């Protein structure tokens, strides 16, 4: 989990959307309410375009196209472009064609409802169709999706939405802005002195409370984005199976990773999120992959050992795992 902390010269608000916690922090307290209204509008548009759980969303409408090219909104086209670029950059470790696999493991509705569902699931080893089966023509704004392929933008859409919102709000308001959507944090505009203080932690908890357990660190973020992906926060049980929401495209099943959380800083939150999720899927050796990409990262093993790549701050505060 990536948790933006409140700075004494900033103003913040917190609420829920897109199935996660939304946190907005601005460097001009007088602009908080107006920025929050713009953020709420932006996230509502993203939900209408990209939600896998809304039958009236644009993304859901693609399920019925059966291989026919269909025109989509510029917003969905941009979200799909980000997802496909993430798939290419991660060698398919992050793949938007995992929609059917997510449904198969029971993640077919908002997570609050998934935890309450006791329907049995049948776990089947099956490679996902693959991101190369999706054709996006940005010039015409059309998407061609083979019959039977269902998309899930959960691995990229929130981070992209945070990036887009932070830039838009900073340009409109003329102040520093931080937008946090669950484990995805994007900043834009002038940062507070010392940077935006963001706590990286292994367990979900209140923003102003020090985690009672699990490793954590506080870092100063001056630009771009920071994302944490993990296998511990969104977990549920079905028919004796312990499941989580990070699916390995090679198997269609929840990934079995040596890492419980991976945090990455990058030029954008979307890039950070793609890398952190891919690291979980890549498993052993992911730290070398992140190092080759030049991405500062912090990886925590299942037993709490912290591994960092070059560029990650050394002045971190660690708690007992």
Image (cartoon, grey):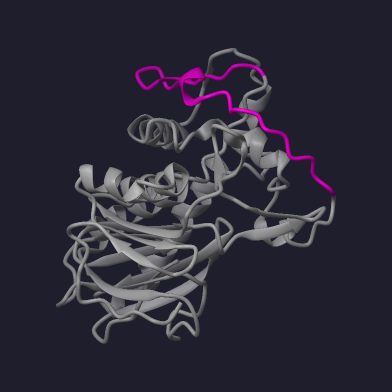
Please determine whether, in this image, residue 318 is positioned above or below residue 269.
below
Q: Is residue 293 visible?
A: no
- On the image, the x and y values in percent for residue 37 come to 43, 64
**Image position, residue 66 (x, y; %):** 65, 16
Q: In this view, does 43 lie to the left or right of 108?
A: left
Relative height, residue 107 to residue 101 (above, below) = below
- Would residue 175 appear left or right of 137 to someone viewing this image? left
How far across and how far down the image is residue 132, in percent? Answer: 46, 20
Query: In this rendering, does residue 194 appear at all?
Result: yes
Q: Which of 213 and 54 is in front in this view?
A: 213
- The range drawn in magenta is 120-147
The residue furthest right is 119
Q: Which residue is drawn at 47% across and 54% down?
A: 258
Instruction: Please give the name of the residue rendered at 67% of the width and 32% of the height, measured from the top-left corner.
Output: 125
| Count of picture labels | 0
The kind of secondary structure the magenta stretch mainly shows is loop
Tell me the quarter of the image containing the N terminus. Answer: bottom left
Viewer-proximal residue among 158 and 242: 242
Quadrant of residue 244 in the image? bottom right
Is residue 111 highlighted in magenta? no
Front one among 115 and 283? 283
Would you say residue 137 sits in the magenta stretch? yes
Taking 51 as reference, is 186 above or below it?
A: below
Left or right side of 163 for 142: right
Residue 40 place in picture, x, y as percent? 47, 60
Q: Residue furthest top?
A: 68
Residue beneath the point at 31% across and 66% down: 178
């Amino acid at each position: 989990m990536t948790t933006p902390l409140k700075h004494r010269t900033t103003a913040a608000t917190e609420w829920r959307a897109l199935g996660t916690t939304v946190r907005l922090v601005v460097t001009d307290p007088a602009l908080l309410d107006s920025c929050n209204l713009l953020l709420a509008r932006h996230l509502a548009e993203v939900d209408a375009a990209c939600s896998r759980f809304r039958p009236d969303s644009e993304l859901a409408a693609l399920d019925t196209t059966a291989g026919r090219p269909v025109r989509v909104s510029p917003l969905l086209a941009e979200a799909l472009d980000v997802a496909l670029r993430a798939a290419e950059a991660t060698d398919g470790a992050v793949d938007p064609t995992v929609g059917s696999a997510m449904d198969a493991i029971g993640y077919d509705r908002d997570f609050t409802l998934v935890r309450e569902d006791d329907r049995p699931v049948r776990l089947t080893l099956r490679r996902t169709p693959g991101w190369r089966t999706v054709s996006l023509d940005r010039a015409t704004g059309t998407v061609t999706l083979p019959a039977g392929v269902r998309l899930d933008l959960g691995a990229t859409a929130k981070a992209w939405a945070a990036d887009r919102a932070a830039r838009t709000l900073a340009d409109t308001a003329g102040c520093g802005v931080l937008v946090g959507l669950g484990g995805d944090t994007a900043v834009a505009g002038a940062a507070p002195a010392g940077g935006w203080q963001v706590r990286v932690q292994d367990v979900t908890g209140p923003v102003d409370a020090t985690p009672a357990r699990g490793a954590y660190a506080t870092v100063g973020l001056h630009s771009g984005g920071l994302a944490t992906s993990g296998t511990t926060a969104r977990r549920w049980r079905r028919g004796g199976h312990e499941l989580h929401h990070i699916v390995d495209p090679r198997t269609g099943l929840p990934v079995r990773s040596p890492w419980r959380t991976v945090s990455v800083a990058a030029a954008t939150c979307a890039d950070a999120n793609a890398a952190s999720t891919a690291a979980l899927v890549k498993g052993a050796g992911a730290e070398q992959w992140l190092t080759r990409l030049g991405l500062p990262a912090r990886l925590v093993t299942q037993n709490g050992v912290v591994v960092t790549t070059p560029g990650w701050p050394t002045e971190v505060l660690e708690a007992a795992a």
